Image (cartoon, helix red, strand yellow):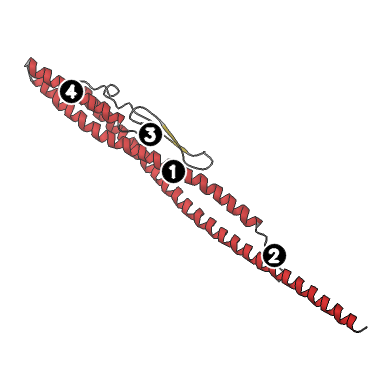
């Protein structure tokens, strides 16, 4: 055997791949959390829209009645619906971020941080939406939520596509790193066999030399 495998280049490549893999895995995890955040906001909007519709129906009932007691009862129901809207907003976020409370989400999409997406928040509370008993105000609130929901859906599609692409890259880099690790281990094994062969050959040469020496002395 005359060759010797130098595994330093493979080790450097493995280290580089592992660093990139760690970065992309972190980005993938962050994108997954952002997707959950946006999905939670969209679900919250769906529930709030139903509550606004219920508020509008109740407000119409108030306008249609001239009975003070009935109107007062409906007014209490409207206040309860507003409370439910605000509760829905509070429950529509993820730890540290709530788009329906006005938080803005800035998400990094690549390793260099050059590609980003910003998801603007919306004040979807009863106060933020201007919920009132007037039908026009309720219609405006419902329309504002529909527009915001459409923007969130567009953001969701963009982030999901990027997350899926990043997940594919993570899988490819994992395969590449595993294969290089195996190659490195094979090289280490080959080096070990080569070293052992050299040691055996050196031992054999020493043994032969010793035997020749003894044979030479035996002639005198």
Give the label, 2 or 4, closer to the camera.
2
Residue 110 picture location, percent across and down: 49, 42
Residue 217 picture location, percent across and down: 90, 80
- Which residue is rendered at x = 27% and y = 30% of the image? 88
For marks 1 and 2, give the CA distance. Answer: 42 Å
Circle 2/circle 3 CB separation < 8 Å: no
Nearer-N-terminus badge (1/2): 2
Residue annotated with mark 3: 95
Label 2 neighbour load within 10 Å: few <14, some 14-19, many 20+: few
Residue annotated with mark 2: 4
- Which residue is rendered at x = 23% and y = 24% of the image? 83
Residue 78 is marked as 4
Nearer-N-terminus badge (2/4): 2
Give the label, 1 or 3, closer to the camera.
3
Label 4 neighbour load within 10 Å: few <14, some 14-19, many 20+: many
Secondary structure at badge 3 equals loop
Q: Toward the viewer: 163 or 80?
A: 80
Secondary structure at badge 2 equals loop
Q: Is residue 201 above or below residue 45?
A: below
Circle 1/circle 2 CB separation < 8 Å: no
* Location of residue 102 (image quadrant): top left
Q: Is residue 121 above or below residue 108?
A: above
The furthest residue to the right = 220
Position of 66 with respect to 46 (left or right) is left
- Which residue is rendered at x = 33% and y = 30% of the image? 100
- Which residue is rendered at x = 60% and y = 64% of the image? 186
Residue 29 is marked as 1
Nearer-N-terminus badge (4/3): 4
For marks 2 and 4, give the CA distance. Answer: 83 Å
Nearer-N-terminus badge (2/3): 2
Quadrant occupied by the C terminus = bottom right
């Amino acid at each position: 055997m005359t060759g010797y495998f130098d595994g330093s280049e493979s080790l450097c490549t493995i280290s580089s791949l592992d660093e990139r893999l760690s970065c992309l895995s972190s980005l993938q995890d962050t994108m997954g959390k952002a997707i959950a955040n946006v999905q939670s906001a969209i679900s919250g909007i769906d529930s709030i829209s139903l509550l606004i519709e219920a508020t509008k129906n109740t407000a119409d009932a108030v306008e249609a009645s001239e009975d003070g007691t009935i109107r007062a009862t409906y007014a209490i129901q409207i206040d309860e619906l507003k409370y439910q809207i605000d509760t829905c907003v509070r429950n529509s976020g993820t730890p540290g971020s709530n788009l329906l409370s006005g938080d803005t989400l800035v998400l990094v999409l690549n390793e260099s941080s050059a590609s980003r997406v910003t998801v603007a928040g919306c004040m979807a509370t009863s106060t933020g939406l201007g919920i009132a008993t007037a039908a026009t105000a309720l219609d405006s609130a419902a329309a504002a939520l529909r527009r915001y929901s459409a923007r969130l859906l567009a953001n969701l599609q963009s982030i999901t596509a990027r997350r899926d692409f990043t997940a594919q890259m993570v899988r490819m880099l994992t395969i590449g790193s595993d294969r290089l690790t195996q190659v490195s281990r094979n090289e280490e094994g080959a080096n070990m066999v080569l070293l052992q062969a050299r040691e055996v050959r050196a031992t054999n040469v020493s043994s032969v030399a010793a035997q020749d020496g003894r044979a030479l002395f035996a002639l005198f």
